[in-house]
Structure formats: C-alpha cells, structure tokens
Image: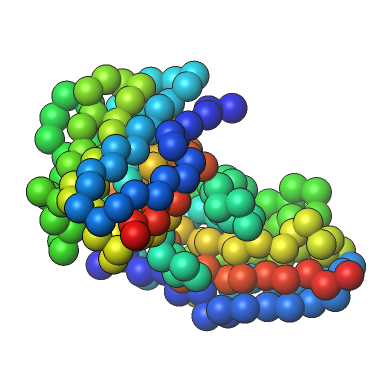
C-alpha cells in the first residue's frame, strides 16, 4: 500500500528564514509520481511540482527547491528567504504511474511565517 | 493552465435535504474526475473516482447511496449529498485529469458544506 508521511504537523518561522518541509513515502511500485501542493487559507489547492520516480534531479524554482532522494524515499521541500505569503498548509502526495493511479496525500504541514 | 471550477463555493442547508455540487473542467477534457473530502485541519481523503460515461468507483467506507456521483460529460461531474446530516459538513474538493496529460491532477477551489 502507498503511504505518505509528513512528520511535521506545524512549523513556525520568522520571515526571511529558510524552512524545509519533510516528506517520506512508501510504495511498492517502481514507477510513480511525487507532488507538492500548497493550500492557502482560501482552501484551493495550488500545484507546485510533479516529480517522476526515474528523475532524481533536484529542482529549483525561485525561492522553492525540492530534494528527491530515492534511496531514503524522501521528497523534501525547501523555501528560502520565506515570506508571509508562504503561510499555508503544504501537502506532499504520491501516485503510482500505472494501476489504480490514486493520489495519496500526506497529513500536511501547516507553515506559518511570522513578520 | 488547466482550470477546474466548482459550484457552489459555499452552501448551507437544513438536515435532510440534498445538495448538489458541480465540478467543471473549463479549458480541457477530463477523462477522470475525483472527489475528495477534507475535515478541518485534516488531509484530503479520496471519496470516489469517476470516469466519463461510467459508474464511479467509491473508496472503502464511502456510502454510494449517500454520495451520488455523475460524470455525464468530459467537462462535468456532479456530487450529490443525499439527505444531508450535520456530520456531512465538510470541505469537498474535486479534481480532474486532462485527457492526454494524465500525469497531473488539477483541483477545483472546493465547496464548503454546512448542514444545520
């Protein structure tokens, strides 16, 4: 069975600090996708990134970066120079490429950036 | 980018009534649509998966007769909460996969349901 664990329930930092959100996953599939979504207070899920299991290159997009380590089944998300607008709940998710293709979400990490 | 809309965004109803929530893919054809439920400060839980023109596949523990799902076209799926009760109050989110680009799911803005 697939499982996504986000051990950090809540994180609170001061603006401009760097923060890393952890994500560990479990799957028996050899081919799968990993995702990060942002859910601001409005509730709408905002897609941030999709990573294929066969592509272990790390990715950077502005202040956001992702570290995919297949050996440790982790897909961590780092925000550098955090801003108040980054405050939201962040979800890591996993989906197998074949089979049922269901998107399985982690429990979410509530990130609060204080001015 | 792909846009998914939901209507209504918020609904308050009396216990015992039925509520219909619409999910539309505005600028793409959605081969598969998903319905999720999210309780406050909790994660998203998949309720059912629907493919256009066929019956929805419900997750274990989700009552089919309670949550009726219809996926009549490639751009529209509806969720009807029948005989709603206060415990059905939740945030309902739909999601859609684009035909030919099934790697990514796009989410609607969600519908907040409050049953009095």
Residue A48 image position (x, y, % from top left): 61, 48
Image quadrant of residue B42? bottom left
Q: Nearer the viewer, residue A55 or A105?
A: A105
Which residue is rendered at x = 47% and y = 45% of the image? B10
Q: What quarter of the picture does the N terminus of chain B occupy?
A: top right
Residue A31 image position (x, y, % from top left): 36, 51
Image quadrant of residue B57? top left
Which residue is rendered at x = 49% and y = 19% of the image? B27
Count the numbered circles shown.
0
Q: Taking the image as drawn, is residue A61 in sight? A: yes
Which residue is rendered at x = 28% and y = 34% of the image? B78
Vertical side of A60 occupied by B25: above or below: above
Q: Nearer the viewer, residue A59 or B60?
A: B60
Residue A92 image position (x, y, % from top left): 51, 61
Apparent side of residue A81 relative to residue A66 in the rendered image (left or right): right
Residue B54 image position (x, y, % from top left): 13, 29
Which residue is rendered at x = 44% and y = 51% of the image? B112
Apparent side of residue B46 relative to residue B39 in the rendered image (left or right): left
Q: Nearer the viewer, residue A27 or A20?
A: A20
Q: Taking the image as drawn, is residue B102 in sight? A: no
Q: Nearer the viewer, residue A105 or B85?
A: B85
Q: What quarter of the picture does the C terminus of chain B occupy?
A: bottom left
Task: Specify the color scheme.
Answer: rainbow
Apparent side of residue B16 relative to residue B102 in the rendered image (left or right): left
């Amino acid at each position: 069975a697939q499982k996504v664990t986000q051990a950090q329930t809540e994180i609170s930092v001061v603006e401009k600090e760097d923060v890393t959100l952890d994500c560990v996953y479990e799957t028996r599939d050899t081919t799968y996708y990993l995702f990060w979504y942002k859910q601001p207070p409005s509730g709408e899920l905002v897609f941030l990134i999709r990573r294929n299991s066969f592509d272990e290159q790390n990715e950077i997009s502005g202040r956001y970066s992702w570290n995919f380590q297949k050996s440790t089944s982790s897909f961590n998300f780092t925000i550098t120079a955090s801003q108040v607008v980054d405050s939201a709940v962040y979800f890591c998710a996993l989906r197998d490429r074949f089979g049922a293709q269901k998107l399985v979400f982690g429990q979410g990490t509530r990130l609060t950036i204080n001015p | 980018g792909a846009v998914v809309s939901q209507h209504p965004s918020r609904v308050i109803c009396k216990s015992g009534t039925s509520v219909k929530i619409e999910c539309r893919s505005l600028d793409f054809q959605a081969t598969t649509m998903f319905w999720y439920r999210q309780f406050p400060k909790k994660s998203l839980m998949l309720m059912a998966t629907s493919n256009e023109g066929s019956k929805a596949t419900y997750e274990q523990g989700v009552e089919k007769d309670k949550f009726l799902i219809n996926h009549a076209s490639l751009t529209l799926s509806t969720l009807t909460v029948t005989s709603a009760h206060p415990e059905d109050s939740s945030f309902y989110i739909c999601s859609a996969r684009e035909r030919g680009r099934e790697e990514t799911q796009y989410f609607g803005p969600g519908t907040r349901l409050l049953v009095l």
